[in-house]
Amino acid sequence: AIDVYGPISDNAGGIAEMCEMPSEVRDKTDALDAAGNTTAAIGKGFAIGSAALVSLALFGAFVTRVSADQTGAKLSTSGVNLLSPVVFAFVVFGAMVPYWFSALTMRSVGEAANAMVKEVARQWSEIPGLTESAGLDFHQRQEWRAAGRELAKPDYQACISIATKASLREMIAPGILVIVSPILVGTLCGVQAVCGLLTGAIASSVQMAISMSNTGGAWDNAKKYTEKGELNGWFMFRDGTPVNEDQFRAAAEAGNSGNKCMQQKGSKYGSTDEGVDIKTWLSKVEQEDPARYQKIMNGDEGITTTDGRKCIYAGKKSASHAAVVVGDTVGDPLKDTSGPALNIVMKLMAIISVVFADFFMSINGGNGLFNTGGLVA
């Protein structure tokens, strides 16, 4: 239930958007998705713990298999000496492997996303009518259909193809890194070096996976929190007028924050009616005074709150929103790609070591081609 809740609510939002439902529906699914990010982080925590225990069990199986080929002092009883230069060196190297792996996967996501952006830009410029119809909201689309105007459709298949091909192609290098590392280390430097490699990789992977899952979810929720308008009322507009910062913050902490604190006068731009929602007011400003609208979005013009404070607008499409979108651009591959993949890194490196244990022991009695292990066969 914990694992499934997040994807269901996330897909519900996507379906609502594809079905061109009103923005209010998307607002509700975003709230569910924010809770889903939290439950997903909990579920990933269980998965990380499971992967760590499985990797430890496979590590033990590797040591046991190696010891079965020894006639003298066995590795399973004598243990691995952490003070050995070879072991310590590969503990450090093993701890770096998850960082290397994560860097490769993060870069792959970025490159695939750039390819997608280029494809969208191509369609934007080449498909007639797409520039006019793509930015319409639910109500505007209904008006277009009522007027008999046809909505241009993008080429979804091209974008799906880019994502599918990239997901397969870009995992080649990270996969080779994880599979080849224990084989090369065991072949060249011996069994004890592999023990150091696995120790460092497991310890580093667990910490990184936990950090990535929680950090990515936090950044995603920060974006949703901003889009909901909850940051409105917290950032003062500085125009040289003296402001008591303590009173300003106290007002925000007292509950006068969010979209409700930025209700404006006028159902029509410029009128004196009270209680107009900030989103409705801004949409009117955008239509009637685009230059002023842009200044508000850039934070160059303040908005007066219901209690008389002058604040920077920090909702959707604002400069603050642009900042959290950058954070979410990093957070999504952290929580959805690199973090979960580290579970596989731990287990795959350990199981490759078990499979090749006899091969390692056949090379200089388990000391590798460089004969650096100090292992007594």
Image (cartoon, rainbow, N blue to C red):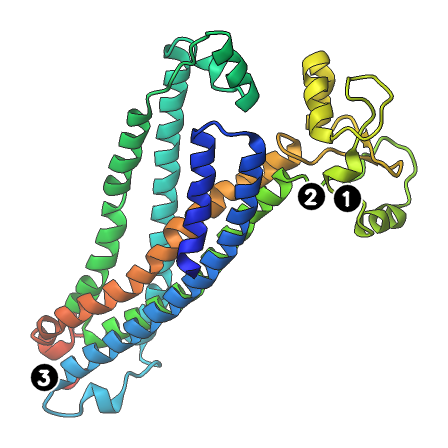
306, 193: nearer the viewer? 306
Secondary structure of residue under mark 2 = loop
Q: Which mark is residue 337?
A: none
Three-letter residue code for mark 1: Ser
Q: Position of residue 363 (x, y in %)?
A: 9, 73
In this rendered view, identify the residue nearer to me: 261 or 87: 261
Quadrant assignment, res 326: top right
Give the class, few, some or many, for how many residues have Cα within 10 Å of label 1's Cα (few <14, many ≥20).
Answer: many
Up-down relation of residue 191 to residue 3 (above or below): below
Residue reaching furthest front? 146
Q: CA distance from mark 1 to mark 2?
A: 7 Å
Which residue matches tag 3?
Answer: 69
Name the residue at 25% across, 58% down: 178
Q: Report the amino acid beneath label 2.
A: Glu
The residue depicted at 49 percent of the width and 47 percent of the height is 331
Residue at x 44%, y 29% (from the top left corner):
19
Query: What is the CA distance from the residue labelled 3 to the residue labelled 2?
Result: 64 Å
Q: Residues within 10 Å of mark 3 (few under 14, many from 20)?
A: some
Q: CA distance from mark 1 to mark 3?
A: 69 Å
Mark 2 and mark 1 in contact (Cβ < 8 Å)?
yes
| Label 2 crowd bin: few (<14), some (14–19), many (20+), radius 10 Å | some
Residue 204 horizontal/vertical position (percent): 40, 66
Mark 1 and mark 2 lie on one chain; the one further toward the N terminus is 2
Report which residue position mark 2 lands on: 230
Q: Which residue is mark 1?
A: 257
Give the mark count.
3
On the picture, is 262 further left or further right than 223?
Answer: right
For marks 1 and 3, the one nearer the N-term is 3
**Secondary structure found at label 1:** loop
Identify which residue is drawn at 46% across, 8% down.
149
Residue most toward the left? 362
